[in-house]
Image (cartoon, rainbow, N blue to C red):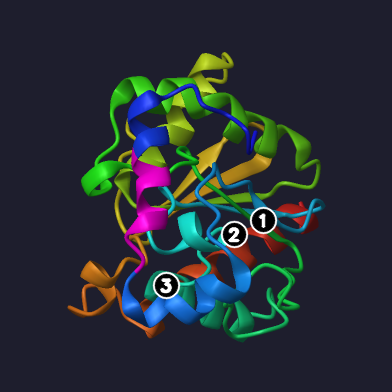
């Protein structure tokens, strides 16, 4: 997966970023290098919770090579996962820094940083197989947490392509929980982007509640 070059626009953009390193990351890149390749899923292979983001940030995961690592979105997400007991560290800076997830896996419908943070439908179509593989491998899956509308719709499209019946009223709404066949739940949250967290649209308390909902739904499934 990390060698994929199926989308010329994305390949050009992700590699271009290696020559546009902001001064604040210059020392980091000198020590660790610049990834500039597709970013694989990260977390626990035996996860009960799969978190679906959107795409790597140009100077975030595209730089570090790990989902939500090296930017403010990741700072917000990993601190919340740590509070919920799903991560052993509250932050992440580089691959190999000791961060590990317990019961959670992070994936995305697009594995390369898109120009202007705008993906195309064709790029999502070509990339879907990677997310399908991630979800299929999670044999203990109980909850899928979609970070944003694009992630929500990507999950539903994947399920429908696999022939899984999905309620047509399963619309994206922050905090909503949608029951899926097989006892799995799809839970929605605003994305953990700076645009949402810096403006207060998504607060730490709001996201903690979403993670708490995910935990409660998983426990309900185990008790059923």
Contact between marks 2 and 1 (CB within 8 A): the answer is yes
Q: Nearer the viewer, residue 142 or 198?
A: 198
Disc 1: which residue? 42
Question: Which is in the foreground here, disc 1 or disc 3?
Answer: 3
Q: Residues within 10 Å of mark 1 (few under 14, many from 20)?
A: some
Q: Is residue 23 above or below residue 39?
A: below
Start-end of magenta stretch: 13-21
3D distance between C-alphas at marks 2 and 1? 7 Å
Nearer the N terminus, badge 1 or badge 3?
Answer: 1
Please state the total of marks drawn on the protein image. Answer: 3
Q: Earlier in the sequence, mark 3 or mark 2?
A: 2
Between the C-alphas of marks 1 and 3, the distance is 16 Å
How far apart marks 3 and 2 lie (CA) works out to 11 Å
Residue that appears at 40% across and 70% down:
73
Q: Position of residue 51 (x, y in %)?
A: 55, 54
Marks 3 and 2 close (CB-CB < 8 Å): no
| Location of residue 52 with respect to 109 vertically, above or below | below
Q: Measuring from the top left, give residue 38's x and y in whole percent.
A: 54, 42
Neighbour class for label 3 at 10 Å: few (<14), some, many (≥20)? many
For discs 2 and 1, the disc positioned in front in the rendered view: 2
- The answer to whether residue 54 is magenta is no
Residue located beneath label 3 in the image: 71
Residue at 42% in and 76% down: 25
> In this view, which residue lies farthest toward the left?
199
Secondary structure under tag 1 reads strand
């Amino acid at each position: 997966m990390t060698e994929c070059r199926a989308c010329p626009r994305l390949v050009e953009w992700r590699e271009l970023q290696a020559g546009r390193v902001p001064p604040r990351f210059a020392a980091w890149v000198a020590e660790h290098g610049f990834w500039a390749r597709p970013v694989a899923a990260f977390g626990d292979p035996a996860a009960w919770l799969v978190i679906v983001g959107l795409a790597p940030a140009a100077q975030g995961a595209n730089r570090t090579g790990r989902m939500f690592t090296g930017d403010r979105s990741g700072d917000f997400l990993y601190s919340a996962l740590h509070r919920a007991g799903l991560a052993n560290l509250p932050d992440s800076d580089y691959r190999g820094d000791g961060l590990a997830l317990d019961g959670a896996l992070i994936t995305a419908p697009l594995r390369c940083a898109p120009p202007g943070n705008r993906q195309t439908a064709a790029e999502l179509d070509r990339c879907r197989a990677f997310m399908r593989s991630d979800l299929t491998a999670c044999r203990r899956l109980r909850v899928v947490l979609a970070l944003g509308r694009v992630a929500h719709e990507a999950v539903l499209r994947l399920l429908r392509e696999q022939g899984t019946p999905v309620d047509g009223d399963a619309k994206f709404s922050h905090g909503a929980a949608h029951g899926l066949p097989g006892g799995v739940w799809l839970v929605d949250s605003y994305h953990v982007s700076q645009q949402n967290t810096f403006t207060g649209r998504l607060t730490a308390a709001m996201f903690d509640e979403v993670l708490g909902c995910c935990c409660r739904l998983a426990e309900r499934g185990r008790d059923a």
